[in-house]
Image: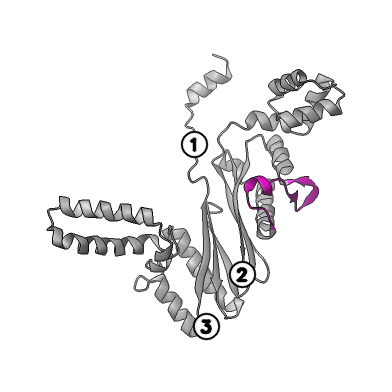
Amino acid sequence: MITAQSVKELRERTGAGMMDCKKALTESNGDMEKAVEILREKGLAAAAKKAGRVAAEGVVETYISEDYKKAGIVEVNCETDFVAANEEFKTVAKNLAEMAAFTSAKTIEEFVEEKYIADEAMTVKDVITALIAKLGENMNVRRFESFSVENGAIQSYIHGGGRIGVLVELTSGANADSLLSVAKDVAMQVAAANPLFLNKEDVDQEALEKEKEIYRVQALNEGKPEKIVEKMVEGRIQKYYKEVCLVEQVWVRDTDKTIKKYLDEKSKELGSEIKISRYARFEKGEGIEKQEENFAEEVAKQMGK
């Protein structure tokens, strides 16, 4: 009989998860040493010990189907750029991007429980765990998005060897192939300018009111008469839109045009209206706090001093 105490002991010894410990003890008929071996063989003990370490490096990968109608984007993290450059790590990221294009998962927890595309005997979680044990670093699948369009095309852009990844979805009655260069231009804009919203309508109203209040106070602090403050606020809000809304932004490749104007021109050229229906921009490690280790302290820690 497997007791709660034995599961607790095994977990403390290996750092593996509760259910993994219970399974290992069941498989070993309660033999503690054998259970430890089972967890080590599966890479679970090694993975668990590394799970607390910060994984802020890694890669952003994208996948586009041959007809440009489906796409996936994924961020897979590790601890160092050395492992991020590992071919096996990069292959896993590419496979996960393809999985993301066709997945029905809505959360990352659901996604990592899916069968791995290159080996259906394993889940994504199993593959990551095995890779942690093999390469010796903490890793995780941080996020993904799936894109699908009926009338239009999806294009991707990868910058800096996977530091930034972008997907752009265009809707249009034009042929998908004719939309690819337009979508690529827009994807490069997203990578470079990092818009927060697609258009004015998408701007969060609460955030907008905060911006207005900030501009209002700034204008009053500058000694402007109250009667012209509102006009100044409106002017600054229009400038804010041009900074944060993709279609309002100045096109990085031709500063005489906005993205909206560029799309209007291309729509006329192709004889069909082109709209940006969606975009996603993932930047590797954004928002993850990296731990700054003092090298001398780390050496002393390793020596037990």
Q: Give the residue at x 55% y 54%.
A: 161
Q: Give the residue at x 14% y 58%.
A: 226
Q: Position of residue 180 (x, y in %)?
A: 56, 73
How far apart are labels 1 and 3 at the CA level?
Answer: 47 Å
| Magenta residues (range) | 103-123
Mark 3 or mark 2: name the one nearer the start of the chain: 2
Q: Position of residue 251 (x, y in %)?
A: 40, 68
Give the number of the disc on residue 272.
3
Contact (Cβ within 8 Å) of mark 3 with mark 2: no
How far apart are labels 3 and 2 at the CA level?
Answer: 16 Å
Q: Amino acid at mark 1?
A: Lys
As displayed, is residue 3 above or below residue 77? above
| Nearer to me, 242 or 86 | 242
Which one is in front in this view, the residue at disc 1 or the one at disc 3? 3
Q: Give the residue at x 57% y 63%.
A: 156
Left or right for 225, reference 95: left
As displayed, is residue 215 above or below residue 172? above
As displayed, is residue 199 above or below residue 210? below
Mark 1 or mark 3: name the one nearer the start of the chain: 3
Q: Mark 1: few, some, or many residues within 10 Å (few <14, many ≥20)?
A: few
Read off the residue under disc 2. Answer: 149
**Quadrant location of the C terminus?**
top right
Is any atom of residue 38 visible in this view?
A: no
Left or right for 214, reference 62: left
Read off the residue under disc 1. Answer: 290
* Residue 263 position by quadrant: bottom left
Disc 1 secondary structure class: loop
Disc 3 secondary structure class: loop
Q: Position of residue 298 (x, y in %)?
A: 52, 23
| Nearer to me, 184 or 215 | 215
Q: Mark 3: few, some, or many residues within 10 Å (few <14, many ≥20)?
A: some
Is any atom of residue 68 visible in this view?
A: yes
